[in-house]
Image (cartoon, rainbow, N blue to C red):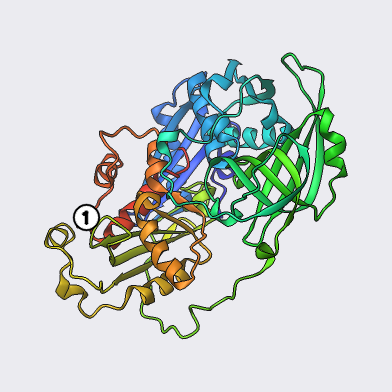
């Protein structure tokens, strides 16, 4: 790997020491290498002679088979720009804190190249983070984007904990909660709890006032001092633990007043608890149960019995064979900076779409599944198959999707396609466009019939678009694709829609340039 800035310093000494290398990107389609440098806002503009001198040196140094394009950008220390980049840092790297950050929480000022940043956080959020680690990570992030010396101060404000996203952006799959009985032994914190908890595995989204029960493990306590407000100077305790029932487990948090500390300290690991609280995205990005009421309880015999397990894959023969797709030609020449953030680079993501005989998952059937797999910033595999419905495809649906009865006449049964899809997605995040409101309902209906639990983490790309700063007249996939300068060919075919959705998701998770 060539260190371009180091080579420039070796050649010209301190003449260009004010430059910072921002990015190096090579496009093999057009044989063009683009290099971008930053220089301080208070320096004079680069002269034509200086630019020619650097271009001549790098052309000789790199010996490229193609065009060299060099850009020079001033590192302006504008308060709004810095605030926007700080918010982007939390969006990319601190998803658990991101909902509690807004421009009102951030201020910055600078004298020459010395920038003072002040960030205020809710007291409960502040109690859960390592300030030194957060400052260090944020400073490293800003150092890559600006030429400045950053001093970061984090303080407490009086904000209340808000919901993770606005209510209009939530499109849950509406199902009647399954409940079971437990016996209440003793109230620990709060009032009475109606003893009808839900299963933990059925609660994967944000939800208020959820009743859960299970065995408590890994209880820990952390104390902090309230910094502001009428209780400033008082000590408060935070308890965290895991709650596990027969279907799964969830991380729990309880902010405890001094009155109930002895009660919480007395609870031992493996205690069976009944709790009331709210499920939110925690500071680690995982679902977290913020507990308000706690009672000691005991399970009834019906809860501890495990249902007989039937393996739906035992006699299955594979019918869909995913294709390996060629790699993207856009690559970072010197690995200076990834095109995408950690969400794209560190996860396997399956983006899928379906076509159906109608809109109702209770009465209509899947006729096609199309999907792509995203790994390490690349679209690497394709999953595509028709499925033969039991009933004919209505004429208006044939006109919309261009899928005819003849095209699916010899297709595999949807049960076989779903089993292959389940196997292909098992260790992946699942995404799609309005996938929570539509596609996932159909897939889960077939999966439930087979005993297959599609319990993957789900990211609805439509919600990601709505939470982004993209300006568009509506949120239809075709409109969004056009607004981002992407392409959607042959809409309302599953693979094409899935591929376009994957491009949208990746585009909205690009690193800020």
Q: Which residue position holds label 1?
A: 491
Q: What residue do we see at 51% from left, 28% from top?
A: 39
Above or below 71: residue 270: below
**Quadrant assignment for the C terminus:** top left
**Quadrant assignment for the N terminus:** bottom right
Quadrant assignment, res 114: top right
Q: What residue do we see at 11% from left, 62% from top?
A: 395
Residue 493 position, x and y percent, is 24, 60
Q: Does residue 386 appear in this view? A: yes
Q: Is residue 34 left or right of residue 243?
A: left
Quadrant assignment, res 495: bottom left
Q: What residue do we see at 28% from left, 72% from top?
A: 387
Name the one closer to the observer, 203 or 15.
203
Above or below 174: residue 232: above
The number of numbered badges drawn on the structure is 1
Q: Does residue 67 appear in this view? A: no
Name the one closer to the observer, 374 or 454.
454
Above or below 373: residue 473: above
Q: Secondary structure at mark 1?
A: loop
Residue 50 position, x and y percent, is 45, 31
Residue 128 position, x and y percent, is 71, 36
Name the one closer to the observer, 325 or 23.
325
Mark 1 nearby-residue class (10 Å; few <14, some 14–19, many ≥20)? some
Q: Is residue 189 left or right of residue 365?
A: right
Residue 161 position, x and y percent, is 60, 29
Q: Is residue 255 left or right of residue 59?
A: right
Quadrant assignment, res 136: top right
């Amino acid at each position: 790997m060539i260190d371009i800035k180091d080579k420039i310093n070796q050649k010209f000494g301190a003449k260009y020491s004010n430059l910072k290398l921002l990015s190096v990107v090579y496009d093999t389609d057009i044989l063009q290498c683009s290099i971008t440098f930053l220089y301080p806002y208070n320096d004079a503009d680069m002269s034509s002679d200086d630019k020619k001198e650097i271009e001549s040196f790098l052309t000789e140094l790199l010996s490229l088979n193609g065009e060299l394009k060099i850009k020079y950008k001033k590192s302006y220390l504008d308060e709004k720009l810095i605030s926007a980049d700080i918010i982007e840092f939390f969006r990319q790297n601190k998803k658990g804190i991101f909902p509690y950050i807004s421009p009102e929480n951030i201020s910055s000022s600078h004298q020459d190249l010395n920038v003072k940043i002040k960030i205020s956080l809710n007291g409960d959020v502040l109690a859960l983070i390592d300030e030194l680690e957060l400052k260090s990570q944020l400073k490293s992030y800003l150092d890559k984007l600006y030429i400045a010396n950053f001093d970061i101060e984090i303080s407490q404000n009086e904000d209340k904990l808000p919901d993770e996203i606005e209510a209009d952006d939530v499109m849950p799959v509406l199902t009647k909660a399954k409940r079971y009985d437990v016996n209440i032994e003793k109230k620990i914190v709060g009032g009475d709890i109606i003893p009808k908890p839900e299963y933990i595995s059925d609660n994967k989204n944000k939800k208020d006032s959820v009743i859960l029960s299970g065995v408590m493990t890994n209880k820990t306590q952390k104390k902090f001092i309230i910094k502001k407000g009428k209780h400033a100077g008082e000590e408060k305790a935070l308890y965290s633990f895991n709650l596990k029932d027969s279907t799964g487990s969830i991380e729990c948090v309880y902010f405890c007043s001094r009155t109930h500390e002895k009660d919480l300290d007395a609870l031992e690991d493996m205690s069976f608890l009944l709790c009331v609280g709210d499920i939110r995205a925690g500071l680690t990005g995982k679902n977290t149960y913020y507990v308000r009421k706690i009672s000691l309880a005991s399970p009834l015999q019906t809860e501890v019995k495990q249902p007989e397990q039937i393996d739906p894959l035992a006699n299955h023969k594979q019918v869909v064979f995913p294709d390996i797709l060629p790699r993207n030609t856009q690559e970072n020449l010197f690995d200076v900076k990834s095109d995408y953030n950690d969400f794209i680079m560190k996860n396997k993501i399956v983006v899928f779409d379906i076509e159906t005989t109608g809109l109702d998952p209770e009465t209509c059937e899947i006729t096609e599944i199309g999907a792509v797999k995203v790994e390490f910033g690349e679209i690497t595999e394709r999953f595509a198959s028709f499925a033969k419905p039991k009933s004919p495809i209505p004429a208006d649906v044939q006109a919309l999707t261009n899928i005819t009865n003849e095209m699916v006449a010899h297709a595999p049964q949807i049960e076989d396609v779903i089993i292959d899809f389940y196997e292909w997605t098992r260790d992946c995040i699942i995404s799609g466009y309005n996938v929570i409101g539509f596609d996932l309902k159909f897939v889960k209906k077939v999966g439930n019939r087979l005993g297959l639990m599609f319990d993957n983490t789900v990211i609805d790309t439509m919600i990601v678009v709505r939470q982004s700063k993209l300006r568009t007249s509506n949120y239809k996939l075709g409109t969004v694709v056009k607004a981002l300068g992407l392409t959607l060919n042959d809409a309302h075919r599953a693979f094409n829609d899935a591929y376009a959705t994957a491009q949208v998701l990746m585009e909205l998770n690009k690193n800020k340039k």
